[in-house]
Every structure is written in C-alpha cells, then in structure tokens.
Amino acid sequence: MPPGSVESAWLLDDFKDPENAKHAAERLIKAVSEPFVLDGKEVFITASVGIALSSGASYESPEEILRDADTAMYRAKSLGKGRYETFDADMRASVIARLQLEMDLHRAIEHGEFTNFYQPIVSLSSGEIVGLEALLRWQHPTRGQLAPKEFIPVAEETGLIRELGWWNLREACRQMSEWRSRYPSCANLTISVNLSAKQFSEPTLIQGIKDLLTEFGLPPTALRLELTESTVMGDPQATVDMLEQMKAIGISLAIDDFGTGYSSLSYLHRFPLDTLKIDRSFISGIVDAKDISDSAEIARTILPMASNLQLEVVAEGIETSEQLAMLKGLRCKYGQGFFFSEPLPAAEVSSLLTGQLHWKPKHFSAASGKQ
Ligand code: C2E
Ligand code: MG
Ligand code: MG
C-alpha cells in the first residue's frame, strides 16, 4: 500500500441487482472526491473500489471474496484514479496466469532456462561494433522463447529479478571475457548490462561486481551498467553515493531509455554518468513527418546538451537509413538497432566478431555514403 493510503472492506448485502453494487461504488467515489479542509488546507483524496459479487460465484470462505475484491481494486487503481472495477472471469484468468508465470520463473531459475542475447552497439561514423548489450531471453519449455517484457515485470514484483539480474551480469561478464581473450581485435569491446532498481539498492552490489570482474579477469572499463531514470530518481543523495562507488571501481554508467522518465539533464548532471541512451520512441519519430517536430527537436536538444556535459550518446532502436543519416547529421556518435543487427545468440555474435574488421552492417555503406 503506498504511503498515505487506507484500505477498507465493505460488506453490502440484500442486493437484488448486481448493478446496485456499482451505484454504491460510484456514490462512494464521488463522496470521497469532495475536497475538505484539514488544518486550514484544502485536501483532495481519491478512492479506488474493487467489487466482488458473491452471487453466481462459488466462494467457500470470506478470504476468497476479499482476495477477489482486492484484485479488482488493484485493477481499478492501475487504470487510473477514482475508478471501480468488478471482479470477473478475465481477471481470474489473469490472476491464474500470473501465478503460473511466477511458479514457472522459480523453476526456470533453478533449471537454468535463461540465456543472454547480445545486440551490437555501433560507431555511427565507422560502422564498427564498439560494444554489446546483454539482453535476457527465457527458453520456456512450453511457450517457446520469451522476451523480457513477458517476464521482467513479474520478476520485478516478486523480487526474483535480483537472482535473474545476477545471473545475467555474471554470464555477460563471462562471455565478454571470453570474447576479449579469444579475439585480439575485440580487446576494447564493452559489455552493457541492464540493472534493475531492486539490484541497485542491494547492499552487496558493489562487492558482487568487484568479485565478478576479478573472477573473469575483466577490466572494469569493459563493463557498462544501464540504469533507468526511475531507478536513479528515487533518493538523489543515496543515488550519488552508489554511483560514485561504482565509478570508483572503474566501470561506466549509462542512463537507459532516456527521455521517457521525468528527469531532466540539469538534474542528471549531478550524477557521475558516462552515457545517455536516447529512447527508441524518439528515434522512430525522428524522420516521420507527423512527429518530426517533437522527436527531432528532442534529439536536437539532447545531443548538444549531452556533449556539453561530456556525456556520450547512444541512439536506441535505429531501424532505417534515414534515421541513421539524421542522427549522424546531429552528430550522434553511437547507435543500436535492427538496422545494424537484432539481439543475437552468443554463437552468432562470435561469428560476427571473427569477421569484425570486415563487418559492415547490412546497407551501412549505402546509408553512410563514406564507407
Ligand atoms: P532496453 O535495455 O532498452 O533494451 C533494448 C530493447 O530494444 C531490446 O528489447 C531490443 O531487442 C530492442 N530493440 C533494439 N533495437 C531495436 C529496434 O531497432 N527496433 C525495435 N523495435 N526494438 C529494438 P528486449 O531484448 O525485448 O528487452 C526489453 C527490455 O527488457 C530492455 O530494454 C531492458 O529494459 C529489459 N531487460 C532485458 N534484459 C534485462 C536484464 O537482464 N535485466 C533487467 N533489469 N532488464 C532487462
Ligand atoms: Mg538497456
Ligand atoms: Mg533502452
């Protein structure tokens, strides 16, 4: 329950028509939303209501009906303030699917069903791979390969993201250490790893990273951690402390999906960061006539400011030669996206790296005009 919120359960009986429960919820929401004065100040509050109807359902205990009303209330909250929702078969199905996913995730961690895919990060001027981002994939025994959006949210909610995150970080360090030692031309490649907010606040994080770097003989400069704006915006002082400890190890730090959160560059300059990754949503609109003013304007603003703050910029989600040309025109140095390569299994990256000196992403020469 978020701070400042109160939960209560209301038992309404003697209803002839289930619609009456909805009318009661509407009256309750309206009554609560009236502003009132507390200590001379006008206060506004909202209510979210979840309704579970006992008629037609086979409830066997009061706990069951409370549980379903609770589920409906969280659904109402997730849809916005001042709403009500009635528990229904769809909600039951999604609760069951969520529980199943949670159980599957536990099993998957035990049985090692995860792998890392790696997506090249490319120098926009030369087309060379400068680094790789490790991205989790789950080889689910019945559902096939699952992308992070299918399981990261549940892993975050349940705290399983800690274990998953450590697995991903460890495997990424191991793999990069192997690539660096096996292919001399890759000696300067970096590995980027996404760090969730829960991992960021783990007291053992710093020591854990140090141990991994030692174990795999990986220089700290080879590791880049990606954090989202919401992760670093929590408690600014604690964030500065943590980021400084990370910088003291020698690893580099990036803000992922930049532009989608509520932070501003002026705020971020307090943090010891190295890189901003401009979110894909701005890149996709950059040459689209409808969006051109907004997205191009955002990129046009971010790039010089980032450069003033001595931050490198990586454009995420480059899909077309037009987007690439526009970004190069804006002096963006690095990029990542399907135009160059989708995230690939490690073995495919190895083949790419063996031909590293000759590797030119598909269509790159045509787009850059100076290959
Ligand atoms: P992200 O870190 O922003 O990763 C980039 C995502 O954009 C990847 O999705 C990648 O496949 C996708 N992408 C890259 N280029 C393009 C493009 O040109 N077009 C389109 N449409 N998409 C592109 P993916 O692999 O599904 O990962 C999604 C997100 O899941 C990641 O976003 C990251 O936030 C999270 N994630 C992945 N692995 C981990 C992990 O190990 N730990 C944590 N905490 N989060 C992870
Ligand atoms: Mg990322
Ligand atoms: Mg991103």
Image (cartoon, rainbow, N blue to C red):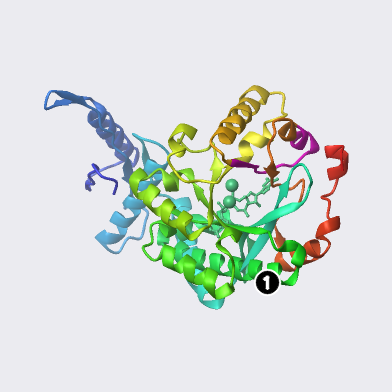
- Farthest residue, direction bottom: 111
Q: Residue at x 79, y 61 (%)?
A: 352
Residue 341: percent from left, percent from top: 75, 52
Q: Nearer the viewer, residue 6 or 148?
A: 148
**Whether residue 370 is situated above or below residue 66 in the rendered picture:** above
Give residue 313's position: percent from left, percent from top.
Answer: 62, 41
The quarter of the picture where residue 117 lies is: bottom right
Please say if 241 is above or below 283: below
Q: Secondary structure under badge 1?
A: helix
Q: Position of residue 144 (x, y in %)?
A: 66, 65
What type is the residue that disc 1 sits on? Glu
Any part of residue 289 in sight: yes
**Residue 199 rendering spot, x and y as whole percentages:** 43, 59
Q: Residue at position x 72%, y 49% from top? A: 122
According to the picture, the residue beneath numbered tag 1 turns out to be: 178
Q: What range of the chain is rendered magenta?
A: 312-325
Q: Is residue 321 magenta?
A: yes
**Which residue corresponds to the image point at 23% horizontal and 29% vertical from the top-left?**
31
Q: Is the C terminus in the top left, top right, bottom left or bottom right quadrant? A: top right
Q: Nearer the viewer, residue 98 or 201?
A: 201
Q: Residues within 10 Å of mark 1 (few under 14, many from 20)?
A: some
Q: Is residue 209 magenta?
A: no
Total marks shown come to 1
